[in-house]
Image (tube, rainbow, N blue to C red):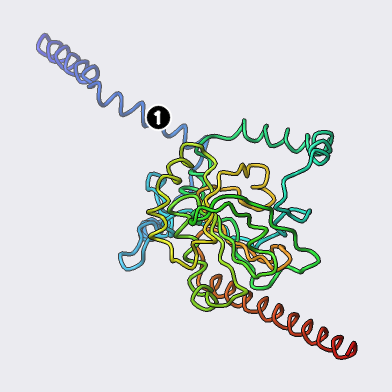
Amino acid sequence: MISRSVARIQHARIASKSIFSIRPTSALSCSTAVSSSRASQKSPQLSVAPSQVFARGLASKPSPSEPSSSKSPSEPTVSEEDGPSLAPLPILPRALGVPKPPTAEPRSWQEKKEEMLDREKHLEKRKFLIKQATSGYFEDFHKTMHGGHGGKMWIAPKVLIREDKALYFPDVAGKNLLGDQVHTTTLCKGNISVVAFLSTQVAEEHVKSFTKFVLAAYTSDPKFKFVQINLQENPLKSAIVSLSRSSIKRTIPEEFHETYIHSSQNMEMLRKPLGFENKHLGFVYLVDENLKVRWAGCGYAKDEEAVYLMELTNKLLQRLQSEGDSKKAGSNEKGKEQQ
């Protein structure tokens, strides 16, 4: 009896040890299993077949033979063009010049008085002074270097400006390479003239690009004039040019010594009417026998622009010659009638 009771006590101790010997990991696994089962009861998930998962994996990876169409946000986008696209230049949008015919005579006191009392003139000067005060000293330089198209502002037209719409070229005075005081009005009156403004060496290259064809064709024509205006409004620069007149004389062909003008005339109020708003560029004007601006170009010329200048100069020369012939014929007929 005693042995049976001892065996029962030992059996009970072994059973109690087996019940309370559960590990913590197994307890955690049991708790997670219970929580997952509860969550699955609350939000059931769709079962996906293994074949579908495999197909999705293939679709998400791009094929090595086909380039990926999507780029990661961190990759920089490279534009196809090397630089920013420039808008095309417009054709000369308006007639250039001044409304009143020029004169080489000095202004009278009455004309000066009328100008002093003219309200519109004062308003124009006020606008000009405001513009000058708000613009920087290197504005023209920045337009030339960073404004696009080398500072060129328009494309020269392939036709003449209509005579009834054309404006007059203003009078510019200065000394030629012969040392004489001359005016553009006296040089251009009755002739077909190509008048060029050149204030820098870059402007000289601009003018050469425009006049290479027309000078080769019509320099020997007595009714053709090529007037170059070396405009230096700064007194110091003007003095330097005056001192270097002999060296300039050696570089300019002899037939152009009379029409090469060094001028220090103030052109600030005439820049906008002439479109001469960038002093670093070269400007070329075709002026007819009545001192009207019939065509204009600026900056480096395209080949077609140089051809336009040559063709339009030829047209004006032919018209002038035909008018001269008709006048001669009319005068001869009058002489015969009088006889």
- Side of 123 where 185 appears, left or right: left
Where is residue 275? Give x, y as percent: 64, 53
Which quadrant would the N terminus be assigned to in this image? top left
Q: Residue at x 61, y 42 (%)?
A: 266
Looking at the picture, does residue 333 appear above or below residue 278? below
Looking at the picture, does residue 321 appear above or below residue 30? below
Closest to the observer: 252 or 299? 252
- Toward the left, the furthest residue is 3
- Toward the top, the furthest residue is 2
Closest to the observer: 51 or 121? 121
Image quadrant where residue 319 sits: bottom right
Q: Amino acid at mark 1?
A: Val
Q: How many marks?
A: 1
Q: Residue at x 70, y 50 (%)?
A: 273
Where is residue 39? Give x, y as percent: 47, 33
* Disc 1 target residue: 34
Where is residue 231? Give x, y as percent: 54, 48
- Toward the front, the furthest residue is 339
- Toward the right, the furthest residue is 338
Give the structural element (helix, strand or loop) at label 1.
helix
Closest to the observer: 20 or 127? 127
- Side of 170 where 138 appears, left or right: left
Closest to the observer: 205 or 139? 205
Where is residue 152? Give x, y as percent: 54, 56
Q: Residue at x 66, y 61 (%)?
A: 92
- Side of 164 where 141 appears, left or right: left
Image quadrant where residue 311 sits: bottom right
Badge 1: how crowded within 10 Å, few (<14), some, or many (20+)?
few
